[in-house]
Image (spheres, rainbow, N blue to C red):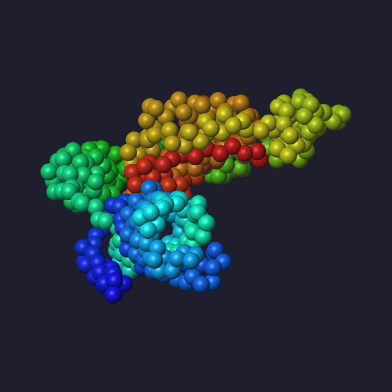
Amino acid sequence: MKKSIFYLLLVASMFLTQPIFAQVDELSPHGGAAKVLFLDHGLVNGVDSVGFTNGIELDYIRKLNKVINLSIPLKVAVADIGNFINNRTLISLDATIQVPFVRTAKGLSVYALGGGGFVVENFEESNLQFPFGVGTYIPVGGNSFITLQGEYRFSTLDLRNNLQFGAGYAFRVPKIKGKPKDRDKDGIPDDKDDCPDEAGPMTGMGCPDADGDGITDVNDACPDVAGDIANNGCPDTDGDGVIDKFDKCPEEAGSPALEGCPVTDSDGDGLADDIDQCPNQPGLEILFGCPDADGDGVPDSEDKCPNKAGDEDNSGCPDSDGDGLADHIDNCPDRAGERSNNGCPVIVTAKDTDNDGVLDKDDRCPTQAGPSSNFGCPQITQEVQTVLAAAASNIQFETGSATLLGMSYPVLDQVVSIMRQYPGYSLSIGGHTDSRGNDANNMALSDRRALTCYNYLASKGIDRSRMSYAGYGETRPVADNSTVEGRAMNRRVEFRLFVR
């Protein structure tokens, strides 16, 4: 009869507590459990006449951290112990630690337990017991679990070692939520508000947007004038890719190279007259609009051999054998020789001027020692590599333009110094943009910016034959173009040294 009443109360408590926690979103570290117990004092003590008996268990459970639970169970049972049959009342209070060793994505947890407890027997005598075992929590709701547990208990008294098995219901207590804080009173809780001290709309995650263009002030380059996302919140009235505050002709579509004003190109070579050094002769952008009939990179006005491709060092004349003397003054134009011997070779014993083990004839850097794996040239130091890497993000231009800002010249001067330090190396210059704006305009802009750096280095005495440049537009991003920081990293000019 007593057992029937107990089971009835236990099942009722399970259904009564279920609705209380069914809608809980967050749980506190506190919980509890109720179990039916099955005890055996015979098997582990070698007493065949003793069988399973029953009891009940009520637990307080405290989650100590993400891994460990503390359980404090109070147990009441009637047990068969040795020669005492069905007449020993047991009351115990334990403290155990539960450590999960199996967890699944659906919330099932299998744990190991261990601890100690105090047991009073028939209100007459007591002993200490040390339980060890395993158990599991099987989720049946947001905060409800079926719990199963088995344990072996060592006792300080004879014939009191025992096995216990429990099955029942466990639950977690919900947190009591207060009203969320909203310091700026904009209706967005502080924990979801990107600007908790400044009122702003939900569309801006709680941050203000003074001009109402959908771009929060903190990310808006023109916070007081409505603009669009592509221009960081600034307006571009004529849609030419140059925002109004930098556009000298804001009502008339023009070229970024001309600060937003229309292009005037008298010779039709694609370069505006104000930057074309030969405005009445179609020419090349790389030569600032001047013609180059033989395509050797030396404008015809400076080319002593305008109809034969050469190099800048020989005033545009060819040097077939590469000995530094143009063919028209080289007595041996097909054989590399010495200037002192009018371009003809002088037969001498093989030399290794820098004593690096690479003969001068094979050494790309004959006066600087370097390994043969690098064609006799010195390896680029880590310090130089760091300077070149930093230069990529420190070369700055006027917005939408290939005009350098003043802060860029010291950086380019460092590159000039490196080129002089490594005369055997060549340099490639690559221009890059972010993804905003027209693809073709981005490609053209990146090419002009790379050209600007190329021309500046040449103006400082770096041989053009040692350099090349190219624009890649937005095709080679190094960061996410959807963020301000990512776009800033993608707007860059990269410098790479190599031995030809």
Residue 348 x, y percent position in the rendering: 86, 28
Q: Nearer the viewer, residue 365 or 298?
A: 365
Q: Nearer the viewer, residue 188 or 50?
A: 50
Residue 45 x, y percent position in the rendering: 54, 63
Q: Seen in the image, is 211 located left or right of residue 63? A: left
Q: Residue at x 57, y 44 (%)?
A: 294
Q: Is residue 463 visible?
A: no
Q: Nearer the viewer, residue 72 or 362?
A: 72
Q: Seen in the image, is 348 located left or right of residue 420? A: right
- Identify the image quadrant of residue 5: bottom left
Q: Residue at x 77, y 29 (%)?
A: 356
Q: Residue at x 57, y 30 (%)?
A: 384
Residue 474 x, y percent position in the rendering: 42, 50
Q: Seen in the image, is 468 located left or right of residue 26? A: right
Q: Is residue 119 visible?
A: yes
Which quadrant would the C terminus be assigned to in this image? top right
Residue 173 x, y percent position in the rendering: 26, 56
Q: Seen in the image, is 456 located left or right of residue 314? A: left
